[in-house]
Image (cartoon, grey):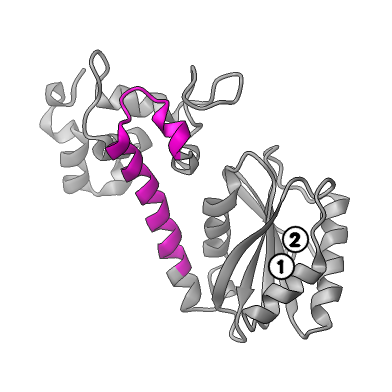
Amino acid sequence: MSLKDLPTDAQPREKLLARGPAALADAELLAILLRTGIVGKGVLQLAQELLDPPASDGVGGVGGGFGGIGGLLQASSSDLSRIKGLGPAKCAELIAVMELARRALAQQLRTREVFDSPDAVKHYLQLHLAHKPHEVFAVLFLDSQHRLLALEEMFRGTLTQTSVYPREVVLRALHHHAAAVVLAHNHPSGSVQPSRADEALTQTLKSALALVDVRVLDHVIVAPGQALSMAEQGLV
C-alpha cells in the first residue's frame, strides 16, 4: 500500500504534524525522511526493510536490514549505496541526520558538566562508537568544569590485540589542556560487560594520567542499544 492509499490521519507526515513525532513508529519516521519508495515497494515497506535485522552474514542491505535506526544511521555511505532505492541524495540525508545528532549532543556536553547529564554522555558515545564493526578506543577530554573539549578516536582493534599507548593519551590530554577524561570503547560483540583487560587498561591509564594531574572520571563501554559505566560499577 502506498502512502496516498492510507487515510490522511494515518499518513506519517500528517500524523506527525497532528500528534507529534513520539506517536510515530521508527519506520514511519524513516519514511518521512525517505519520501518515496521504489517500483513495487512503497516507502513504508522500504523503511521497514531497512530497519529489519541484518542478514545471517551480518551485512546490512544484503538480504537484511541494518538492525534498527541506530544501525542504519551508523552505516557508511558504501553500505547505504548498496541499497536499491537509496540514491546519493537519500544516502546524504541519512548521513547528515546522524551528524546533526552527534553535533547536538556535543554542543550540550560543551555547555554543562558531563555528569549533569550522564545519559547524554552515553548516547553521544553510542552515536560515535556503538555500531562500528571493529573495536575503537576513544577519549573524551574535559576541562576543569568537566565540560567537553574534544572526543578523539585514538586506537582501533581489540584491546588484547592492539596496544593502547598511555603516552599518546597523556600527550593528547596535555594538548587539549584537559583536567579530566572519560575513556570509552565499543564491544562489537554486543556485550557491555568489562573484561579483565578493560579493567587493567583503565588502571594503567589512570596511573599515567595522574602523573600530569589529569583525572580519569569514567570508562564507558558501549554496544548497540546499551552502555555501561565502569565508574558506576566501582571499577574506576
Q: Which residues are magenta?
A: 77-106
- Give the x, y percent position of residue 99: 41, 54
Classify residue 6 by image quadrant: top left
Q: Earlier in the sequence, mark 2 or mark 1?
A: 1
> Does the magenta run of residues contain 36?
no
- Residue lying furthest top: 40
Q: Left or right of 229: which side holds 123? A: left
Q: Left or right of 185: which side holds 129? A: left
- Give the x, y percent position of residue 43: 26, 26
Secondary element under disc 2, as helix, strand or loop, is loop
Residue for point 13% across, 27% down: 7
Along the viewing direction, whichever of 62 and 16 lies nearer the viewer: 62
Q: Are marks 2 and 1 in contact (CB under 8 Å)?
A: yes
Residue that mark 1 sits on: 218
- The mark found on residue 230 in the picture is 2
Q: Left or right of 163: which side holds 48? A: left
